[in-house]
Image (cartoon, helix red, strand yellow):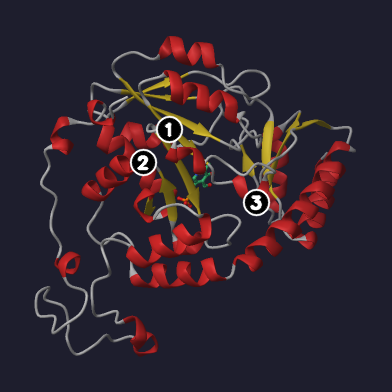
Amino acid sequence: MEIKNLVRKNILSLKPYTSARQSHLTGILLDANENSYGSVLENFTSLQLNRYPDPQQTQLRQSLGEALNIPTQNLFFGVGSDEIIDLLIRVFCYPEKDKVIVCEPTYGMYKVACDINGVGVINVPLDQNFQLDTEAIKKSVDDKTKIIFICSPNNPSSNLIESKQILELAKELNVLVAVDEAYIDFSEHGGLIKQTLEYPNLVVMRTFSKAWGLAGVRCGFCAANEEIINLLFKVKAPYNMNKLTSNAILGAIKNISKRNEFIRKILSERKKLEKELRQREKVLNVLPSDANFISFKVGNPQKVFSYLETNGIVIRDRSNQFNFVGYLRVTVGTEGENNLFLKKLDEIL
Ligand SMILES: Cc1ncc(COP(=O)(O)O)c(C=O)c1O
């Protein structure tokens, strides 16, 4: 399939802004109207915060590429995966004309990003096991359909989506298949990053906000074929990855053992929490989780949510989401947090 046939014509012909730091990162830099005297933040002198960052994200891509064993040219970094979701829509979808498929219940930002960009959203619901209805998806695709967003493990149902089905869609359909693997580190599946090298229309997004514990840093990335990566570079804000973020992420990539330690702890707490929730008669269902959260069903979700909130415990009421009636979603916290949550849950149940 030809990716360029899916891209908005104005993006294909776009002459992107050429930023100063694209051509020169060192030298006597008098080209970008920066402050040559330094920055007011004296703690960060080695980062040279008075200078704009590298628009090509060179170090980040090299470092992550080595860690994942993926070529540098197949990686792109965004201000959270939320930025990448928005960029994909802007590269591929004409406002007021094109459409995106989402499979609800799922992460709400796909629809919000479409709504902001004036792009139509078609909901092809997940089946009763929260898996893709591939036949229905195939039937829904027409020449205006540009992207299918698939969240695996899915938020809020917490299950992995069968990769065979995802790859079948990527193989058979002339659309972009964008897989959001924000929670993949908590699952037993290695994810589909490597498959982006085989499938020209497959994009896999990941984030540093979950297992890496860096939600405050705002950094996500995606892997895809070079053509798609180049289009994202064309459209992004010139300096989207700032030096503080890059420095934090480069440090994080070197400390993968800490991430793995977090994952071990979270998985052990998830197992305990899942078991505890299942033991409660008034908890009507507990969905098996491949993520760092658990969705569970109760008779009166609003009441439970409010009671917990009044007691300082904030979970997420997902009971208004499509095909998710009655469900609340709780993030796996520390042992102490989880015990307190269960104690207060018992009081209201
Ligand atoms: C499925 C999913 N994708 C993406 C994100 C956002 O990721 P980021 O913090 O990288 O923007 C979230 C946040 O909760 C999420 O649940």
Q: Residue at x 38, y 31 (%)?
A: 201
Q: Describe the element under mark 1 as helix, strand or loop.
A: loop
Q: Quarter-wise, where is residue 338 in the image?
A: bottom right
**Circle number at residue 314:** 3
**Circle number at residue 305:** none
Q: Earlier in the sequence, mark 2 or mark 1?
A: 1
Q: Nearer the viewer, mark 3 or mark 2?
A: 2
Q: Describe the element under mark 2 as helix, strand or loop.
A: loop
Q: Is mark 3 within 8 Å of ligand 1?
A: no
Q: Earlier in the sequence, mark 3 or mark 1?
A: 1
Residue 208 visible: no
The amino acid at mark 1 is: Tyr
- Residue at mark 3 to residue at mark 2: CA–CA distance: 40 Å
Q: Residue at x 61, y 56 (%)?
A: 211
What residue sits right under mark 1 in the picture? 199
Q: Left or right: 245 with respect to 155?
A: left
- Crowd rating for badge 2 (residues with CA inside 10 Å; few <14, some 14–19, many 20+): many
The amino acid at mark 3 is: Val
Camera-nearest residue between 151 and 39: 151
The answer to whether mark 3 and mark 2 are in CB contact below 8 A is no
Q: Left or right: 90 with respect to 82?
A: left
Q: Which quadrant holds the N terminus?
A: top left
The answer to whether mark 2 and mark 1 are in CB contact below 8 A is yes
Q: Is residue 143 above or below residue 103?
A: above
Q: Position of residue 105 (x, y in %)?
A: 56, 28
The amino acid at mark 2 is: Asn
Q: Position of residue 136 (x, y in %)?
A: 50, 11
